[in-house]
Image (cartoon, grey):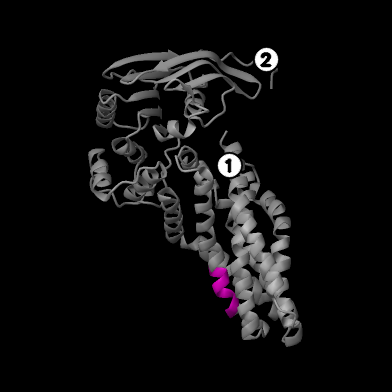
Amino acid sequence: MLRAHGLACDRGDRRLFSAVDLSVSPGEWLQVEGANGAGKTSLLRILAGLAPVAEGLIEWEGRPVAEVRDDYHARLLYLGHAPAIKEDLSALENLHTTAAVAGRPLDEATAMAALRRIGLKGREDLPARVLSQGQKRRVALARLLCSQARLWILDEPFVALDVAAVAQLCSILDDHLSRGGMLIFTSHQAVQLAGTGASLRLGTPPAPREGAA
Amino acid sequence: MNAFLAIVRRDLLLAARRKSEVFTALFFFMIVVSLFPLGIGPESATLRRIAPGVLWVAALLAAMLSLNRLFAADHQDGTLEQMSLSPTPLALLVSGKVLAHWLTAGLPLVLLAPVLGLQFDLSARSLGILMISLLLGTPVLSLIGAIGAALTLGVRGGGVLLSLLVLPLYIPALIFGAGAVEADLAGLGAGGHLSLLGALLALGMFFAPWAATAALRIALE
């Protein structure tokens, strides 16, 4: 399980949030909510280990993440705002590369099946640059179908998806949770997921003072 | 190791899909080198004297042309984040990117150099030494360049800053690379210069990926 106590994040000399506690156990999900600029993405980046922890402690399976970093990263799947899709590569090549970089190379059949299931049948070999915004997101989400990671950290996974794709993503997330996976995500919309879940609301950022730079 | 190969393959694929970027650097190299015989005139003694320096300087500049794209695209589309979260050490993945950069921006220069060297009336033996010196030297250029590219990542006007940062660091490779051919022309033997170039390469292969990785981690925060 993942636990964090007293997390704080600074942006420049402004404190975005402080004293954030959270914990996610197998089969549980956590939705991070908050206004634009509240620090949702920053929190996810800190949890994923992409940004330094200004204050507080993150624990994975009861041990500080800093100590078990390799093990933690081997079990983590992080999908950020930038979907890591190369415009000049096809959907299939993109999926193969990201999977290999994540340490789990895919065979052809698994990759094709994942792309079909995510609704890209017949578009597997098109360069990503000719795909629509939503289809590019689907290429990125196809990684979820091939992932064995225990913990998924998804930043705005529902953005740019149509209604059918949102429903499909929900079912993928449900499957993950029912297998004992953990999920942390941000979203502005209310999402119905199976399993136990909680939501964490980050405070509104203090309005900039008059005359402050 | 799988991830390393995947990165090399991906970058080669991307280069193959964007051939113009590879060819721009190659044509730049060809044109710059060819301008000198045209500007200086057909005195073979003078041309032979300046050949090593001209070819090496042109190779430096050509290898640098593609440097600012080394990490910039990966940074922008989130690939770099995924690389840093990979169970494979980031330094190894960075080495993969450097290798791909050398294969697309360095190796073609090595292969083209003897043809261009003919314009300077270099003997077959000198052309051979030139090729060996470039073969040892161009990977050094990619390795040092990667540090510069990582340090200037996300900096506005990074392209100019990159050349200011990297070109001085290229000086040792230039001195020993061009020096090898000159020494051979003077009948002194190129062995010493080539050994030093090889030493630079060994040092670079060991340290440059680590330095570039440290710079990338700063850029990622």
| Mark 1 secondary-structure assignment | helix
Q: Residue at x 36, y 43 (%)?
A: A99
Q: Residue at x 71, y 56 (%)?
A: B169
Q: Position of residue B66 (x, y in %)?
A: 57, 57
Label 1 lies in what chain?
B
Is B108 in front, or is A177?
A177
The crowding category of the residue bearing disc 1, from other C-alpha atoms within 10 Å (few below 14, some 14 to 19, many at least 20), is many
Give the magenta part as a residue range: B108-115
Is residue A171 rendered to the left or right of residue B16?
left
Question: Could you confirm whether marks 1 and 2 are on the same chain?
Answer: no
Q: Which residue corresponds to mark 2?
A: A210
The crowding category of the residue bearing disc 2, from other C-alpha atoms within 10 Å (few below 14, some 14 to 19, many at least 20), is few
- Amino acid found under the numbered disc labelled 1: Leu
Is residue A108 rendered to the left or right of residue A185?
left
Q: Which residue is drawn at 69% across and 80% down?
A: B37
A65 up-or-down from B209: above or below: above
A94 up-or-down from A196: above or below: below
| Mark 2 secondary-structure assignment | loop
Q: Which residue corresponds to mark 1?
A: B216
- How far is disc 1 from disc 2 in space, using C-alphas? 36 Å
Q: Position of residue A80 (x, y in %)?
A: 44, 33
